[in-house]
Image (spheres, rainbow, N blue to C red):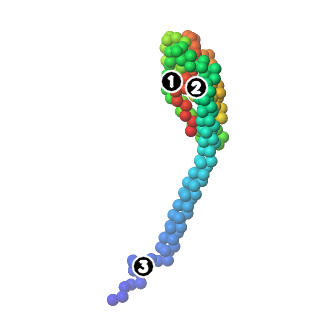
Amino acid sequence: MAEPANSSHENTPVEKKSNMLMIIIIIVLILIILLGAVGFLLMSSEEEAPVAEAHKAQEKSIAKEKKSPSNSEMDESRKLSDIGILYPLDTFTVNLKSDAGSRYLKVTMSLELEGPELSLELDGKAAVIRDRIIRILTSKSLEEISSKKGKQKVSDQIMDTLNAMIGDGQVKGIYFTEFVIQ
């Protein structure tokens, strides 16, 4: 017995066209995703090159400093015994000012206080202190903070800002216990 012409096993020309259209759409979507991923990888590798160069330059300068201690380094080592009360702050993770993309700075620091009574005042102003430090850090670019002088400038700026808002004593120094740029 012969089967009827309109069997459910045969695809009609309309179904064949819709299947082909679906396959083409899937292939185009896959190509778009792959091109986007390749573009992202190329852009991110171009942005990492200056950071790698900065790290190499920083390592070279550290190696030079280790070879010949200067008078200021000798003075710093003598001051270690004179460090006052330390007031640790929570870690700050902020975006740096950047035209080329996202740069992050993760900093943990401690404040050297003039006296123990100052820690009570700082406890009461913790939110304002965090806000002021975040504003200072986010205003800096990678180039401004990647050098030793740049870190010292940021430290001095934070210290001046905090001392302007404190009534009982002052912050004598700022010590970075973590300083990571990504």
Q: Of discs 1 and 3, which sits in the foreground?
A: 1
Quadrant of the image containing the N terminus: bottom left
Q: Which residue is mark 3?
A: 10
Q: Which residue is mark 1?
A: 89
**Mark 2 and mark 3: Cα distance apart in space:** 72 Å
Q: Are marks 2 and 1 in contact (CB under 8 Å)?
A: yes
Amino acid type indicated by mark 2: Ile
User: Mark 1 touching mark 3, by CB under 8 A?
Assistant: no
User: Considering depth in this image, is 43 or 77 the residue closer to the camera?
Assistant: 77
Dot 3 falls on a residue whose secondary structure is loop
Q: Which mark is residue 72?
A: none
Indicate the position of residue 79 as horizontal and vertical percent values: 56, 16
Upstream in the sequence, badge 1 or badge 3? 3
Name the quadrant containing residue 133: top right
Residue beneath label 2, please?
133
Residue 171 visible in the picture: no
Please tell me whether mark 2 sits on a helix, a strand or a loop.
Answer: helix
